Amino acid sequence: MRPDILNPLFTDIRALKGVGPGLAKPLERLGLERVKDVLYHFPNSWTYRKSVSCLDAADVGQNIILTVTVMDHRGGNSPRAPLRIFAADAERNYITLTFFGRNGGWARKQLPVGEKRIISGKLDHYGDELQMVHPDHIVPLDSDSSPGLAEPIYPLSDGLTNKRMGQLAATSLQAVPDLAEWIEPTLLSSRGWSSWSKSINLLHNKDDQDARDRLAYDELFSNQLAMRLIRAAMDKRAAVPICGDGSLVSKLALPFALTGAQQRAIADIEGDLAQSRPMLRLLQGDVGAGKTMVALMALLRGVEAGMQSAMLAPTEILARQHYASLQKLLSGLPINIAILTGREKGSLREATLMGLADGSIHILVGTHAIFQEAVTYKALAVAVIDEQHRFGVSQRLMLSRKGRGVPHLLVMTATPIPRSLALAAYGEMDSSILDELPPGRTPVETRVMSQDRLSELVDGVARHLAAGKQAFWVCPLVEESDKSDLAAAEQRAEQLRLRFGDQVALVHGRMRGPEKDAVMERFVAGETRLLVATTVIEVGVDVPNASLMVIEAADRFGLAQLHQLRGRVGRGSEKSVCILVRSTQIGETARARLALVRETNDGFRIAEEDLKLRGAGELLGTRQSGENPFRVATPEQVRALIGVAADDARLLLDRDGGLDGARGQAARVALYLFERDAGVATLRGG
């Protein structure tokens, strides 16, 4: 149960005074549904003002606060004629307050002749006069809402004004409780950080970097603590030690010799499998580094021990790709391998479920369907999750309900992850890195070409196809609201069909599974030569004969995504080329991004740069899925603070009395506050 002290923060925003259905909609568009959401909706800029007692031409260009007496109203009798209100300061210096459009009636009421008012806005020159156009504040002398020297400017959506957002923030701040401190005292003192409640208040009243760092640290600390609790919970539940006898691995006909990095990773995994503590290992490898082969060794060790193994993929295309490649590698071995996705129905699905329950299926490949409640295994020992960042921490815990003990878990990601972010996302895991390419894999040559040379590019594609080779053509991410990525892909496919006819195929994310797979199978079989695609092909397509990748409007893609797309070629012995087609007009940042991709094939270097540019949520693929772990912490703060947070979480659990001591009780509150649900679930389970 959530601690009572936090309940006011989780109150529905519609319970706040003045928030009806009309205001709730723009707030929802910003993701503001609870009081806590408003508290963490910080200003993204500030308006700073100078308070003056009299007008001075030296202040032109600045935002000023000034008390004036209204002298006269002129004009404003038609929408085209501006209303000009003349006013004077205490020393009879004059200023013209100018209002355009239909604001005349309102302005006359706010500024009656002969009355004194406090005004604020930007001071300008108009000819020889001092002028203020549309003052941002006009208030009586006795008003309690006088403009401040610093005004927060909040991110807004249609139907929500900055003033209203500020009022909501002020109301929400009244609900902020005093929470016991969860940060280690020496660390708190050395950083000069304020308490959590004071830091929240500070950031709605001024731009304070120490307060931002403190609140970013809270997110990182609670995240690390949750991961340590997950690991501790899994460690308490015994796994079955797996010691394969080599009877299957020794019969594998490997297509190439294992790299040193693969051998080291396999040794790490086999060491983990032999323990009664469940393996929880992250296998990082750049595109083409041979992760699947390492995963196969883990799967086979489970089968050699008389148990079952499973492999989970994020998409149906990738699941079927793994299934086909594993079938090929395991050909001739006494292994029954099956596939289970949302598409398997009826008697076929029933037969698979029965085979898993009676143990006759040794290896299962599939999408997240393989972990549904209806799927029971006789003895699941090893699970491999591919492209794990699309699933999240909670799916790791699902495994503990599938098998005699907790299955050993290997997580693979083809997105190289900077060390700081790997710690943030996979902090409870051991790690192995594949940093060598298998023999025969040559780096892809990358070139950048302007959009206005498209006809030359199409001629080059024609020569490539005439030589019996295949190519990908990836269409741009479309930002205009009246277009879609699909429309761009369909249009490009039609244009290319005018030149290449039936050699051109089209695949996109809105196709139904069977239709998409049929297109992919024809391309893999060489029946079509040029595959036009949206980014659906980013993961899961392995076509060794495809040695040309065209990425249109490449300046719209992120660095890591470009690297992933480029990795779809260079998978055979042929020299491969990736053409990055850029827009005719691009900024310096986009130009530098494309230059970096052209310069290096090192995914880890690209990932570091991408983290700086795009942030943790997008790099982990979680921003759209709602699992982005950090609301406050920027990539720079992650890099600077994640190691300290990891050490502090370990210190709390190992030395400072765990969660039963005073700081531990405060840390429990933090887990609930930051909704680290997986970690909270371990608390509930004791």
Image: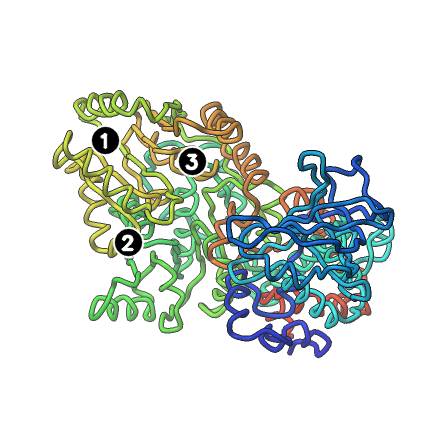
Q: Which residue is drawn at 44% across and 57% down?
A: 383
* Three-letter code, disc 2: Arg
Disc 1 packing (10 Å; few <14; some 14–19; many ≥20) = many
The answer to whether residue 613 is left or right of residue 632 is left
Q: Where is residue 353 in the image (x, y as percent from the top left)?
A: 30, 69
Q: Which of marks 3 and 1 is nearer the N terminus?
A: 1
Vertical position of residue 540 compared to residue 157: above or below: above
Residue hosting label 3: 562
Q: Which mark is residue 642?
A: none
The answer to whether residue 61 is left or right of residue 540 is right
Of the 4 image quadrants, the one containing the C terminus is: bottom right
Q: Position of residue 344 (x, y in %)?
A: 25, 63
* Three-letter code, disc 3: Leu
Q: Is mark 2 on a helix, strand or loop?
A: loop
Q: Where is residue 673 in the image (x, y as percent from the top left)?
A: 67, 67
Q: Which residue is drawn at 57% across and 65% down?
A: 32
Vertical position of residue 417 compared to residue 168: above or below: above
Residue hosting label 1: 470
Nearer the observer: mark 3 or 1; the answer is 3
* Three-letter code, disc 1: Gln
The answer to whether residue 367 is left or right of residue 124 is left
Q: Is mark 1 on a helix, strand or loop?
A: strand
